[in-house]
Amino acid sequence: MKNGLYSIHVTLLDGRVGKGSGVIMFRDGKILGGDAYLFYTGSYTVKDDTFKGEVLVQRHTTPRQNENPLFGGPAPVGIGVSGTFTDTRGVMNGTALVGKASQIFGATLHKLADAD
C-alpha cells in the first residue's frame, strides 16, 4: 500500500448482510484507523502491487440501541487482510474471527491524503 490516509468501505460477503465505513492510515508497515464506534491497529507488508496484514479491531464507543457496527462486539476482533493497490485506490478482502464464527468481507479503499 502507498503511505496515506484512505476511506474504507466494507461489505460483508458469504451471504451475510452488513456494511461499514471509516478511515484507515497505511504508513510504513503500520495500520491505524477507525469509525464512529471502532478503532483499528495493525501491520502489513507489501510485495509489488499486493499487500497482506493483520488488524485488531476494538470498540471505543458503545453503539446506540438500533446500531450494530461490523465486528463491533465488546471483545477485540482479529482480522487477516490481503489486497491489491494503485497510487490512489485499493481493494481488500479479509476474514474476521468474531467469537467462534468467521466473517468474510470485501473493502474498497480510496486515498484521501498522503502520509509521508
Image (cartoon, rainbow, N blue to C red):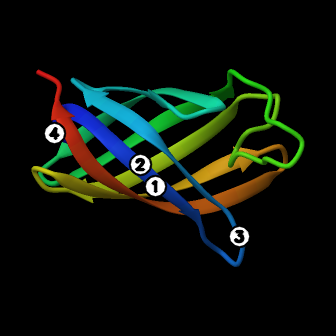
| Residue plotted at (28% across, 26% down) | 29
Q: Amino acid at mark 2?
A: Ile
Q: Which residue is mark 3?
A: 17
Tag 1 residue:
9
For the residue carrying disc 3, how many other residues have a C-alpha within 10 Å: few (<14), some (14-19), or many (20+)? few
Instruction: State which tag comes first along the sequence, 3 or 4.
Output: 4
Q: Residues within 10 Å of mark 2 (few under 14, many from 20)?
A: many
Label 2 sits on residue: 8
| Tag 3: amino acid | Val
For the residues labelled 4 and 2, the Cα–Cα distance comes to 14 Å
The residue at 51%/55% (across/down) is: 94
In depth, the one of 9 and 56 nearer the eye is: 9
Residue at numbered disc 4: 2
Residues at discs 1 and 2 in contact (Cβ within 8 Å): yes
**Image x and y of residue 85, in percent:** 20, 55
Question: 31 above or below 108?
Answer: above
Which numbered disc, 3 or 2, marks the residue that appears first in the sequence? 2
Amino acid tagged 1: His
Would residue 110 appear left or right of 70 to someone viewing this image? left
Q: Are the residues tagged 4 and 2 within 8 Å (C-beta)? A: no
Q: Residue at x 45, y 49 (%)?
A: 81
Residue at the limit of the structure toward the bottom, as seen here: 15
Dot 3 falls on a residue whose secondary structure is loop
